């Protein structure tokens, strides 16, 4: 059974994360010419804030529905 409160909390958290922007790590396994894996390359990526998400969060806060 789906708990509506849990779903609502997860959606709010995801929306706020998107509105503020966030960073994450992307991992890539590198192999040498012989095909042996050896190193893991970690790259930090930045997802910028999304204007639509910002607008929605502000509207919900102003309407007292957040």
Image (tube, grey):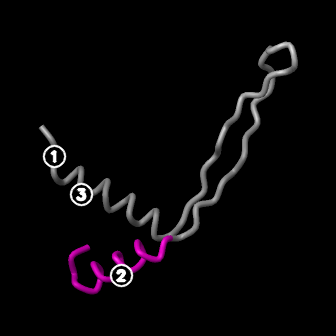
Residue 53 location, x and y as percent?
Answer: 40, 72
Identify the secondary structure beneath mark 1: loop
Q: Is residue 38 above or below residue 56?
A: above
- For this view, does 2 lie left or right of residue 34? left
Q: Residue furthest bottom?
A: 62
Identify the secondary structure beneath mark 2: helix
- For this view, does 35 lie left or right of residue 46? right
Q: Is residue 65 above or below residue 42?
A: below
Residue 44 location, x and y as percent?
Answer: 69, 51
Q: Which residue is mark 1?
A: 3
Say which of 59 and 61 sits in front: 59
Is 20 one of the magenta-colored residues? no
* Segment tinted magenta in the rendering: 50-66
Q: Which residue is mark 2?
A: 58
The CA distance from mark 2 to mark 1 is 26 Å
Mark 3 and mark 2 lie on one chain; the one further toward the N terminus is 3
């Amino acid at each position: 059974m789906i708990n509506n409160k849990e779903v609502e909390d997860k959606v709010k958290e995801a929306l706020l994360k998107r509105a503020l922007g966030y960073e994450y790590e992307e991992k890539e396994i590198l192999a040498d010419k012989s095909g042996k894996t050896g190193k893991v390359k970690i790259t930090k990526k930045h997802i910028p804030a999304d204007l639509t998400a910002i607008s929605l969060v502000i509207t919900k806060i102003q309407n007292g529905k957040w």
